[in-house]
Amino acid sequence: VWTCLGHSQTVFVPPSWTIEKQMASLINEPNLPNRPQIETKILVRADNNVLPLKLGNNKRLPPMKFGGGHAYFSSYRLKGLALSFRRWTLRHGYGKADFYEGNGGAAQLYLDSMSAGIDDQRVYDVNASLNRTFLRRWTLEYSVPLKRGQGRFSIALHWLRVHRLQVGTLTGRMQMGQFQGDLSLLTTRGLHPHETRSNGLTVDIATVLPLSTKVKVGIWGENVLSRIWQKSAQRITAKVATNTVEPDADGFLHAVPFLQGRIDKVSVKVKAKQVWAIGASLQQGKSNWLLMAQRERDWQVRLGCNLSVGREKRVWILKGERPFPWQVGFSTPRLQFMLGVDKWNKAAAKEAMTVIRWCWPF
């Protein structure tokens, strides 16, 4: 029996089209390769609003305060290899997507616990969730020239092999050194690897069109259609209690179990999180002004420019909203490099992203 999770519990997967690829299609002529070429890509990205990334792996943190009402941590890692020839592209990649979210009480409880500074006199109201996947992705992409070769429409079909899936929530309250709450978790952890391998299909679309000789616009949609069939997972529903005692019927005190509930083995159907982006470029001489907007959780808008610094060599810079308010890059016909940060001080940066792409025609 297949169980379908609600719309609010879609899963995150590594991105297909990153911003440097989108900008390249707005700036360069969208010529399809007339001879085979191989492309490799590496993406590493992490961003949060709780603590500097440099401290993320520390076993002990200094005392810190979280002043907001909403906390999150997001991380993507992806490696890929592609073969393109004329209108067709065949691509393989593997990677993971991790997303944690919570309220201010959950963030402060995490910081206090990591600094051994939990305040027994304080009440921590906790509402947190996690969403994690690890997968391999095989892609077949087909592109059609538009506007006499000045534009392009692309459609990509992805087959996913999911090796790990975790979606869950934890709600409760911590006071007087005791935590009591409710855990709801769908996970493949604890199962044999052969049971966790499941399949999925997703569809991406993209269009780049010239509005004039100097203006181009583009739209990209990832996971426009999607379905993942997780054939085997564990659904855990439990009460969580720490450092809690209670009297029994005879008045004797005894410790409440840390975790008590049930585990059900289920098969589920989930959807991949949709990601939309739009962009526009205005050519002025050898430069291009850029407007990019992307919606992952909310819409983020960025403005920037792309400058020619030599024969087929370009540099660009984007400035906008979080995450990654600063993005810089360098590109040649065979290499693209992008770096995104929120602060140039490595010790204080909470957001960092690197994309490297190589291309070899043969």
Image (cartoon, rainbow, N blue to C red):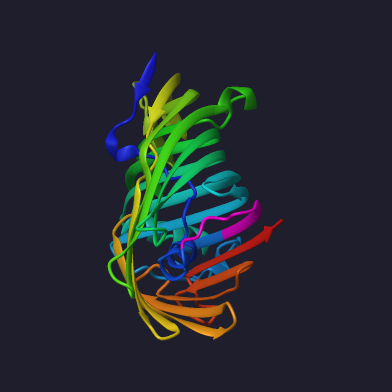
Q: Is residue 322 magenta?
A: no
Q: Does 50 appear above or below 75?
A: below
Q: Residue at x 44, y 20 (%)?
A: 266
Residue in the picture at 65% in, 60% down: 359
Look at 51% across and 69% down and name the residue there: 352
**Is 42 in front, or is 286?**
286
Q: Residue 318's image quarter?
A: bottom left
Q: Foreground residue, 293 or 59?
A: 293
Where residue 49 appears, as percent x and y from the top left, is 40, 66
Give above or below for 69 relative to 128. below
Residue 144: percent from the left, percent from the top?
A: 42, 48
Which quadrant would the N terminus be assigned to in this image?
top left
- Residue 63, horizontal then vertical, whole percent: 48, 71
> Of all residues shown, which one is farthest toward the top?
1
Examine the rendering and report whether any part of residue 294 can be seen.
Answer: no
First to last magenta residue range? 30-43
Q: Is residue 32 within the magenta segment? A: yes
Q: Nearer the viewer, residue 310 or 114?
A: 310
| Front residue of 163 and 225 | 225
